[in-house]
Image (tube, coloured by chain):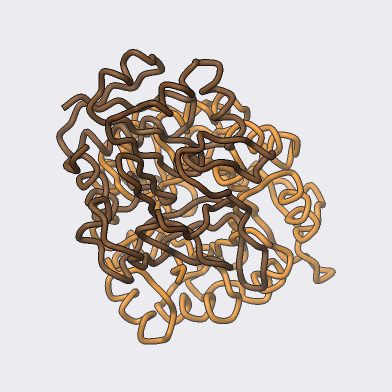
Chain colours: A orange, B brown
Amino acid sequence: MLSRRIIPCLDVRDGRVVKGVRFRDHVDMGDIAELALRYRDAGADELVFYDITASPQGRSVDRGWIERVSRLLDIPFCVAGGIRDVDTARAVLHAGADKVSINTPALERPALIGELAAEFGVQCVVVGVDSVREDDGRWRVRTHTGDPERTRAPGRLTLDWLAEAQRLGAGEIVLNCIASDGVRGGYDLAQLRAARTACRVPLVASGGAGTPAHFAEVFREADVDGALAASVFHAGVIEIPALKRYLRGEGVEVRDA
Amino acid sequence: MRVAVVDAGGANLGSVAYALQRLGVAPEVTASAQALRAADRVVLPGVSTAATVMRRLRELDLVETLRGLRVPLLGVCVGMQLLFEHSEEDDTPCLGLLPGRVARLPDAPGVRVPHMGWNTLEPERAAPLAEGIGAGERAYFVHSYAAPVTADCVLASAHGRRFAAAVQRGAVAGVQFHPERSAAVGARILRNFLEGRA
């Protein structure tokens, strides 16, 4: 039986893992490969590396660290941030990443999704979506969320965008619910449930994990395939082996570390 | 031991080569028929589509070389699908080293395609490739098409329907999952392949 995935997300800047405090004042957390292996040993099912320098600064991803991680790591990993074209995606995938995740560039030019799917297969193409409920009660996407001062609201309805992204060739959706992100009050179950009905490809929940119960809840109630989290893992608030033991006790199918 | 990894343009080439390096071998990534014939082991990886990889193998004039190999051959992911006669993906004729046709996984309620993640393996029959892999152990899968469970299937898995997760017939072997990303289970499979007798 397919297990539900636990996915730590690591922010990368200039080849190091960093932790942002309100998107600013990044604290160095250590070497990428060292942290990647530590999470692998703890039982992470997959890792996401978000290159926070590449995206807002319009720079391309540095493939040196991707290659280093790929040499050492024996679980899958995805690279996000700074991927705007087929050539960059190719460089990232050939350096050893299993998947690329695109967010703002996909909204700016949706054809990019199809180009990547045609070139590398849908299984390599993850579309990240940042979304928030607006005053009229509907969810709409945000772009450029890597930098709060540049974040924009293009007006696109989230559920429409999920349908279009899949039609174009998205092989997986990561839905980051902005309002719950970083608050540790639980995943946005209402939004993820709505997204689930709109996704026939794997759906990964992002934003809001604070306790092991939040993971059990999002798997059970929103039927997501994976749950992504950052701060609770980095801060040691939740240890992955204990989380998996808890989830198994709750009847959630997980992989042994 | 000379291990050749076929460079058919797939994006996981590097990852497969690194996984072999972690086991202490120095694989040669190559598109040369001569290098394949001189190797003791040949690995055929493949990320993208059956049609793309087959086209590339034809362009490189490697189809007959792969069909005529006497040394152990391991197909990975799409590389395993190509071992069969035909793939439903773009209606592609494949290498035909194993009988059977590769078909798309069914969309069903609660069954997401692509099949992505860690799924359980069920031993179908004893084989050198699957030695030491017990029922319920997990490997990492990413695919939308899959081969049927035939007499060549040594490990099965299920997603919407049962399919072949690993096959072996004589010197021809394949895994649908990614051994290079399947932690200890993946390393064991690769070691079995390297140590298996031709």
Position of the C terminus of chain B, as image quadrant, is: top left
Q: Is residue A233 left or right of residue B92?
A: left
Image quarter of residue B126? bottom left
Image quarter of residue B22? top left
Q: Nearer the viewer, residue A23 or B96?
A: B96
Q: Is residue A171 left or right of residue A138?
A: left
Q: Residue B104, position in %: x, y?
A: 63, 53
Q: Residue furthest bottom?
A: A250
Q: Nearer the viewer, residue A150 or A246?
A: A246
Q: Is residue B122 left or right of residue B97?
A: left
Residue at (64% x, 38% y) in the render: A117
The vertical placement of B64 against B181, above or below, is above
Q: Is residue A65 left or right of residue B48?
A: left
**Residue A86 visible in the snapshot:** yes
Residue at (50% x, 15% y) in the render: B60
Q: Residue B150, position in %: x, y?
A: 46, 58
Residue at (52% x, 69% y) in the render: A208
Q: Nearer the viewer, residue A194 or B182?
A: B182
Position of the N terminus of chain B, as image quadrant, is: top left
The vertical placement of A167 against B113, above or below, is above
**Residue A80 visible in the snapshot:** no
Q: Residue furthest right?
A: A136
Image quarter of residue A119? top right
Q: Residue A42, position in %: x, y?
A: 26, 62
Image mark count: 0
Q: Nearer the viewer, residue A170 or B135?
A: B135
Residue at (52% x, 81% y) in the render: A217
